[in-house]
Amino acid sequence: MQNTDTPDPDTPPAADTAARLTTQSIRSFVLRQGRMSPAQTRAYETLHPRYGLPYAAGALDFKRTFGRSAPVVLEIGFGMGETTARIAAALPRCDFLGLEVHAPGVGALFKLLDEGHLTNVRVIRHDAVEVVRDMIAPGSLAGIHIFFPDPWPKARHHKRRLVQARFVALLATRLAPGGYLHCATDWEEYGQQMLDVLSAEPLLENTAAAFAPRPDYRPLTKFENRGIRLGHRVCDVVFRRNNRVSAESGSDGTTPQGTA
Ligand SMILES: C[S@@+](CC[C@H](N)C(=O)[O-])C[C@H]1O[C@@H](n2cnc3c(N)ncnc32)[C@H](O)[C@@H]1O
């Protein structure tokens, strides 16, 4: 699957949030030289044309990308992709765009998609901050999932956390009104940061009084089950985009693709 889109010369220049992120990306990951298994390598090489998209500096046309008009949910940092594949299988009427920088995880997800005969997922192996900034049109997403992002526990590394104000401000502009941003973590202090940051974002409103109950669509992972047995608390934070006008889009935020 090729991204044939080119940058739209009529797109208004990116305003504040995106411009700030151009010069100061978030170093939220370290590229590990993780070994790919032979099966992951094979899946990566043979299935990339079907499920992979290249990074390109131009907004994706979701209808062309997925071959239909359906709500599009973005997942950031899907790891090995088990949750992505399970949610995509359970919600065939939605399309999913997964972002991950770690190649073995991309190969692993391609393999799961092929085994499950899933057609509603595409993957970009690239920094999510750049993809959201450059490839996702304002007001175009029905939902965003950020499940168990790296917690960067040391205080001097907190600036590497993905869920921080300036990235959340950008994400909020990419949601259609009514679209949701769902973050989950088993690192309680990061959960509190998620709650604080999303609460402070003017385009978002909490769906719960504070932390949300785990929505049914998010399956429990093996890792999470182990954490629960060890007494770790898992925090889900689920906010919705309101109808306020985004300063960035300068529009009412409705989606050109009618995805939401
Ligand atoms: C702790 S893992 C969680 C994986 C998965 N969501 C789960 O619940 O098991 C976080 C993942 O986010 C990815 N990641 C971190 N920063 C990213 C970024 N800026 N763009 C894309 N992926 C990123 C990492 O490579 C890693 O695989």
Image: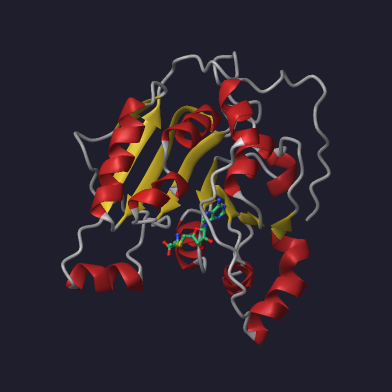
Count the marks: 0
Q: Residue at x 62, y 84 (%)?
A: 37
Q: Residue at x 19, y 33 (%)?
A: 209
Name above or below for residue 219 compared with residue 34: above
Q: Nearer the viewer, residue 185 or 165?
A: 165
Q: Whole-percent x and y of residue 229?
A: 18, 73
Question: Does residue 9 appear in this view?
Answer: yes
Q: Whole-percent x and y of residue 238?
A: 33, 40
Name above or below for residue 40 compared with residue 185: below
Q: Is residue 152 left or right of residue 91?
A: left
Quadrant assignment, res 153: bottom left
Query: Please, which residue is most extreme toward the front here?
Result: 156
Quadrant in the picture for the N terminus:
bottom right
Name above or below for residue 76 compared with residue 17: below
Quadrant assignment, res 221: bottom left
Q: Residue at x 29, y 38 (%)?
A: 195
Q: Is residue 125 left or right of residue 49?
A: left
- The colour scheme used here is secondary structure
Name above or below for residue 146 compared with residue 256: below
Q: Nearer the viewer, residue 7 or 61?
A: 7
Q: Whole-percent x and y of residue 54?
A: 75, 53
Query: Please, which residue is most extreme toward the bottom here?
Result: 38
Question: Does residue 67 appear in this view?
Answer: no
Q: Residue at x 64, y 56 (%)?
A: 123
Q: Whole-percent x and y of residue 116?
A: 57, 71
